[in-house]
Image (cartoon, helix red, strand yellow):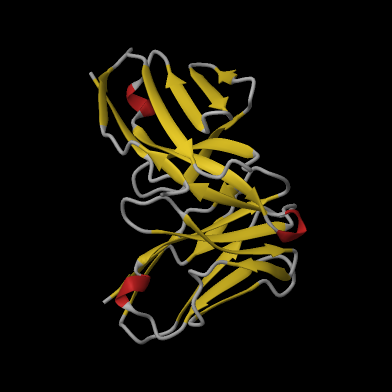
Amino acid sequence: RKEVEQDPGPFNVPEGATVAFNCTYSNSASQSFFWYRQDCRKEPKLLMSVYSSGNEDGRFTAQLNRASQYISLLIRDSKLSDSATYLCVVNSPLTGGGNKLTFGTGTQLKVEL
Amino acid sequence: DTGVSQNPRHKITKRGQNVTFRCDPISEHNRLYWYRQTLGQGPEFLTYFQNEAQLEKSRLLSDRFSAERPKGSFSTLEIQRTEQGDSAMYLCASSFEYEQYFGPGTRLTVT
């Protein structure tokens, strides 16, 4: 079983739609979680951290369910510029205070006119 | 631009040659990471530095790979005797705490 699993998509949605991505992780000891966004042939960029209480940043809402080991990302009122691959990321501690990021394969979103 | 920088951005090499990539992290970040990403996959962790000390290496990092961060600032990743399977995007990231910021990557093609 992969450490982080995501539906690869693509999700093709019209502009203005609401779209939700889901992710599951296998290590129940994982402590922190993120969503990264990656545009084609570019580096991943941090979109938002995911907290147990859920958190919102403008049109984006992230939720974590530790009991089910499940993470979600909701995008409301989607824009053409939201078209990208969304990577679910689980953080594991390393020696000396570092952190290893384990990425899912990513979910591709295409927002269309 | 005060972000993470990587050089070169693209490298094409013949199988069996050695290549070296450089990463310059965000200046106040003491932690530096190398990842590798192949097509259709998320980035995979390779190695981690805290200042100049290499504290963690993935099993993905075979003995043909070596990374250094001699003065705790920039880092280099060298691949010896390259193989076609080494073709990938090599990403560097730096952090001060949890949040890692990635550079633009070096895309390696081994012919």
Q: Residue at x 31, y 55 (%)?
A: B39
Q: Is residue B27 left or right of residue B64?
A: right
Q: Residue at x 53, y 24 (%)?
A: A62
Residue B62, x across and y down, in percent = 49, 77
Whole-percent x and y of residue A38? 42, 41
Position of residue B38 in the picture relative to residue A58 (left or right):
left
Nearest the viewer among A48 and B76 is A48
Can residue A80 be seen here? The reply is yes
Residue A6, image x and y in percent? 38, 38
Percent across and percent down for residue B94 are 64, 53
Above or below for B54 versus A66: below
Query: Could you tell me which residue is drawn at 71 percent across and 65 percent down?
Result: B73
Please report the residue visible at 44 percent of the width from the left and 20 percent of the height from the top: A74
Q: Quadrant of residue A33?
A: top right
Q: State which quadrant residue A32 falls in.
A: top right
Is A82 left, or right, of A30 in this rendering?
left
**Res B1 seen here:** no
Question: How many numbered badges does the structure rendering display?
Answer: 0
Q: Nearer the viewer, residue B1 or A3?
A: A3
Considering the image in quadrants, where does the C terminus of chain B appear? bottom left
